[in-house]
Image (tube, coloured by chain):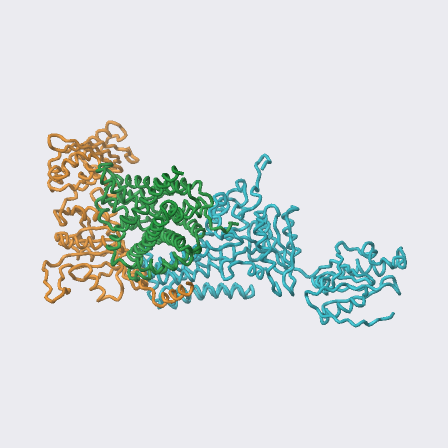
Amino acid sequence: MLKRKKEVTYTYSPSSKTKVSKDIEENIEIIKTMLKDCDDVVFREFEVGGDGGEKMFLFYVDGMADKLLLDEFVLMPLMISSREVAPDFNQIKNKLYEVTKDNAMVVTDFKEMDIIEDIVMEVLSGDTALFISNTDKVLLIATKAFPTRSVSEPSAEIVIRGPRDGFTETIRINTALIRRRIRDPRFKIKQKRIGVRSKTDIAIMYIEDIVDKRVLDQLYSKLDKINIDAIIDSGYIQQLIEDKVFSIFPQAQTTERPDVVAAAVYEGRVGILVDNSPFALIVPVTINAFFQSGEDYYSRPVISTFIRFLRIIAGALSILAPSLYIAITSFHPQIIPAKLALSIAATREGVPFPAFVEAIIMEATFELLREAGVRLPRPIGSTIGIVGGLVIGQAAVAAGIVSPIMVIVVAITAISSFSITNYELATALRLLRFIFMIAASIYGLYGIVLSYIGTLIYVVNLKSFGTPYLAPLSPFYITDMKDSIFKLPLKYLKTRPLHFDPQDIIRQGDEDGSK
Amino acid sequence: MKRLMFVFLAMLIFAGCWDKIEIEDRIFVYGIAIDKVSNELNKSKGPFYEYVNENIEVTFLIPNPSKVVSGEQNVFENITVRAGSIPEAIEKVFKKQNRHLFFGHEKLLILGEAVLRDDKILKEIVDWIDRDPQKNRSSFVVATKDVKGIINITPKLEKLLVPYIIGTLKNQEEVSTLLNIDFNGFVSNFKVNGVAILPIINKVKDEGVIKNVFLIKDYKLLKEVDDRYIRGYSILTNSLKGGRKLFKYKDHVLSYLISNSHASLEAKEEDGKINFNVKVKMEGDIEDFILNEDLLKADIVHNIEKSIKEQFENELYETVRYFQDTGYDYLKLKDWTKKHQYSLYKKYEKNWDEAFKTAKFNFDFEVKIRRVGVVR
Amino acid sequence: MVPNDDKISQFQVALIVFLTPIGVGIFTLPSTLAKDVETNGWLSLILGGLVCLLEIYFICCIAKKYSPAKFTDVLKQLFGKFLGTIFAVIIFIYFLIFSALEVRLFAETTKMYLLYKTPLEYIIIPFLFLGIILARCGIEPIARFFEAVIYLVAITFILVFLLYLPKSDYSNLLPVLRIHPLKLLKGVEDSFFSFSGFEVLLLLFPFMRDSKKSFKVSAISIMLITFIYVVIFVQCIARFGVDYTKTLLYPTLSLIKSSDVPGAFIEGIEGLLFSLWIVLIFTTLAMFIFAYSVIAGDLLKQKEAKHIVILFLPAVYIVSLLPDNIASTFELVDKLIKSLGYFVILILPTLMFIVSKIKGERA
C-alpha cells in the first residue's frame, strides 16, 4: 500500500473550525498533530473488507471509552463479520459510509460530525470517532465509560428517613437520578459546556411550566457571560453567578441529594448540575431553605415543625451565645439570676483575661479543631474531637485560662452550628458570630442589637436571582407560612411557595381530582 | 461612607468599652442595711463640702462568690461604712475595696429604727433607690430595731443571710399575721403620701424573727403595731394570702386554715359620717379538732362556722378601732372610696383623716369550712 | 422574584404606619397622661387614636385624588408654588429635627438603662449610621426590614403582656370618667402626639404598588398602636397607681423593670426587653430619615435620595447634641411638638383636605 505523506500544517485554536477532509490520511495527520504528546489517546487504523479494503480509523481516550464495546460491536462487525456475510464488500465499496452507519455498527448511540475540533472535543469527553475513507463525515460512537464512583449515601447531608442516594461526579448519572424522580416531559435538562479549556458539562434543570422564566433568563445571561478556562467544581459556577461575591451568605443552595433538587425543581426553582462535582446548585434560594431538610417532608409534620423551631433557635444560638456571654458577664450581670452570676464570678476569678479575650480564645480554638478534624483522615479526625473536647477544654479550665462556663458556651455554639442543615450557612453564621462578639465587647447588649440591625439591613438587601433572601418572612407571604417555620401536613400544602413566583401555583388538587 | 464606618469601628475597638466591668470585678450587693448612729450634723468648715458627717452606718451584705461555690459556711461578707448619705458611703467603699459595687441583684433593704425616725434620711434613701434605674424594684423592704444583730445572724439551713430573710418574709402565704412589702409597694405610697407599713425583723437568740410592723406617717415612724392587728388589716385590704386563725370553740383553741378570703366594701353616708359595710367571704379548713363530735354533721360544722365568724368580727372591730386611733387611713379606704364612690370621696377629700376617724364599720363575715381533713 | 421597581405592598404600608409611631414616646407617655388625665388616660388614648384616624382619612382622601404625584408636587398644586415650597420646607425641618431628637432621647434612655458611662456621642453615632445606611437603600428595603423585625417586635409585646398582665391591681384604674372635659382634651392632645410618625403616610403614596386599601390598612395599624398604648398605660397605672406614675420619668421602663420572671433562666428581663425596644426606635429613626431625604430630594430636584441622606447627617447629629441635658431635651421636644408638630400632623393634612375639596368643587 502506498503511503502518501501529505504535508499538514495545522495549529490548534479553540475557535477554528476545520472541516473533515475526504482524504482520510489528511484527517489522521491533523488529529495526530493536534493530539501530539497526548499519550492517553489511542489511534487505531484498520482496513475493512479484507486485504485491499478501505481504510478506517478510530481514536479514543484510553480509560474513558468502553474498550469492550469497541472491540465487540464496532471492530468485530466491521473487520470480521463484514467478510463473512453478504453483501460482498466490493458491491458496497462506494457507499461504505452509509452501510457502516446503517448496517454494520451494533451500537445504539452515535452522531455524525464533520468539524474536527468538535470531534476531538467529544473524543476527549469519552466518545470514539470513526473515520471512514472517502467520506467527509465522521461517526462518533458514544462509548463514554470512564471510571465512576457508584451512587452512595451523601456524606454531608445525612438523613435518617429518606432516600440514601447521592450525586456522584458524573453528570449523566446525576441527571438520571433526577429524571427518575421527575418523569415529566416538561422537565427539561438543558446542557451547556462552560470553560474554554475544560469544556465542562453543565445541566440546567427546570420544569418548563412551573419555573419563573425571569429567573431562567437571568441564569442564562449570567452563564453566557462566563469566560473562564476551567470549571472544576460547582463551586466555580456558584461564585460566578452570584450577585454579591463578597457576601458571606450563599446565594445558591448546594446539595448532594437528588431528592432535594427534585423537590426544588417541583417548587419552580432551577437546579444546576456540574460535571465532576457531586454538589448540585439550586437557585433562587432563600434563608428558609437553609433551615429545612429533606427529612422534614418525610416525617411527621408536628415533629418537623418542632425540629425547624429547634434549628432556628440553634441558628440564633450559634450567632449569639458567645456574644451574650460577653455582654452579660462584662456589662449587664443583672440579666441572669443572682446565683448564676455568683457562680460565674467565682469561676472567672482566676481567669487572667477579660471575657472577650476568653471567648475569642475558645472560639478560635474550636474553629481550629473543627478545621483540623475535617482535614484529617477519618480515623484520626475523631481523635481530634476527643483531644479538643476533653483534653484542651479540661486542661484550659484546670490551668485557669478559661472558665468552665465559657467551655459550656463554646460547646453550645458548636452543637448549634452543627445542627443547621446547610453547611455553608453554618459557616456564614460562624463568621457573623465574631462580629457580634466584637460589638458585644464594646457596647454590651446594645452592641448585639446594633449588629443585629446591621446584619438585617445587609440581608434584606440581599437577593438571590431576584428573590429576597428573607422570603417568605420578608416580604411576608402568608400562604407560604405553611411550609417555612411551620410545616403543615402535606394535605394542606396545596400551593407551591409563592415567593419563588411559580407559573403554576397549584401543586395539589382537591380530593375529587379537580384543581 | 464605608471608609468612614471603618475608621469609626477601629476607633471604637481601641477606645471603647467604657462600661465594661468584668463580672469577677463586681461586688454583688445582695442587701443593704442602713442604721443611724448619731444625730450630730457637723457643719463643713472649709469653703466647700467635705465628708464630715458620719451619722448613718451603711452595711452592704455581699456574698463572696468563691466561698459560695466552694460551699463554705458564712459566705456573707459585710462591708460597713459610716457616712452622711448613701452616695457618700459608696464612695467610701470604693476607697477600701478594689471591686465595683453592683446593685442589680439587690434584694433586701433593711432599715434601722433610728433611720425611720429621721424623715430626712429616710426620704433620701428611698429616693436614692427610686431614682437609679440600676436598682432592683422588686426587692423587699424590712425594718429592724437591731441592725447589727440582724446582719450578724448565721442562718442555720441557708448559706446566705439575704435569701434567708426573704424566704421568711415570703412565708406570708403561710402566716396570716405576716406582711411583706416590696420596694414598689413601699415607695409608691411613701413618695406620694409619706406613709408606709414595714414589717419588723429582730434577732432573737441567733435567729431572725419577724414580729410586729411599723407604721410610718409623714415620712417617719409613727408607732409599732402588734401582730394581732395584721390579720385584720390583711383581710380588709384583701392582701391575705393564707395562714391560720386560732379560735375558741367550747373552751378549746382550734385552728382554722384560711384558704381564701375576699372582702367587699360598701360605703354610705349617715349623719355626717361615713358608714362602711364590709362583707367578707372566707373559705378554709379545720386543722385540728379534739372533741368527740362528728365533724361531718352539718349542724356541728355550722356551729363552728358561727363561732369563727363571731371571733373574726370581733377581731376586725378591734383592728379598725386601732387603726382609727392612729389618725391616718392605713386601711387604704380613701383609695377605695375614690375608686368606687367618687362623689363621697369628693365630699370628704379635704379632711379624710377626720372622716376616717369617725367612720362607722359594720362587718359581716361569711365563713365556710370546706374540708376537715381525713378523719371524722 | 420581586420586581425591582422600589414599590411597596399594602401590608408593608401597614407595617410602616404601625412601626414608625412606636418609639421613645411610649416610655414617657403614661406619666404625661397620668399627670393630665389621671386614670382616664386610656380614654384619651382611644380618642387620640380616633383623631389620628381622621387625619389618616384626610391623607388618604388627598392621596386618592392626587396619587401618584409626589408629595411636594401635591403641596404645590394645592397651595401654589411659593406656599407649597414653604410647607415642604417646614415638613422637611420637622422630620429632620424629630429624627435628631428621637436619637437623642433614645441615647439618653440607653445611657440610663444599659450603658452608664459610654459617651452620648458614641451611642448616637453607630445608631445614626445604621439608620442612614437603611434609609439610603430606598423604600422597598426599608419596608422589608420592617417586615423582618416585626417578629421580634411581636415577641417583645407578647412578653410585656404575658409578664405584666396577671400581677397588677386593676382597681387602680377607677374611678372612670371623673374628669373635667377640658382636662380630657389636654390628654387627647398628649395622646394624639404620641401617634406622631403616622404622617410619613403622606409621603408613601407614590411608592405604593396599589393604594386602594391604604386607609383600611393604616387604620388597622393605628388601632393596633392604640391597643398597645392602652395596654401599657393600663399596666403602668395598675402597677404603680396614678399618683406614683406621675412621679416617674420613664414609667414604661420602670414597669418593665419591676417584673420578676418566676423560676426563669433570666432574672432582670428589662435589659433584654429594652434591647428589643431599640429595634422599634430604630424603625422610627430610619423612616424619619427616609422621609426628610425624600422631601429634600424633591425640593432639590434630585432623583437619587441616597446622597441627600448623608448631606444632612451632620445636621441631624448636631441637633441631637444641642440640648444640654435631659430636662432641656424634654422641653425642646415639648416646644417643637406644640409648634411644628401641630402644624405638620394636625393642621396640614386638614388644610390639604379642605383645600383639595374646595378646588375639587371648582373643577
Q: Position of residue B268 (x, y in %)?
A: 16, 31
- Which is more toward the observer, C222 or A435? C222
Outermost residue, top direction?
Answer: B299
Question: Is A249 left, or right, of A216 in this rendering?
Answer: left
Tell me if residue A186 can be seen: yes
Q: Is residue A232 above or below residue C74?
A: below
Q: Quadrant of the C terminus of chain A?
A: top right
Q: Position of residue A329 (x, y in %)?
A: 34, 60
Q: Position of residue B274 (x, y in %)?
A: 14, 33
Q: Quadrant of the N terminus of chain A?
A: bottom right
Task: Chain letter for orange, please.
Answer: B
Q: Is residue A443 above or below residue B365?
A: below
- Which quarter of the picture shows residue B46? bottom left
Q: Position of residue C55 (x, y in %)?
A: 34, 42
- Which is more toward the observer, B151 or B96? B96
Task: Chain letter for cyan, please.
Answer: A
- Which is more toward the observer, C121 or B364? C121
Image label count: 0
Q: Is residue A163 above or below residue B10?
A: above
Q: Is residue B292 above or below residue C162?
A: above
Question: Is A503 left, or right, of A56 in this rendering?
Answer: left
Which residue does the image show at 68% across and 61% down from the upper left?
A: A147
Q: Colour of chain C?
A: green
- Which is more toward the observer, A288 or C47? C47
Tell me if residue C277 can be seen: no
Which residue does the image show at 70% across and 68% down from the upper left?
A: A12
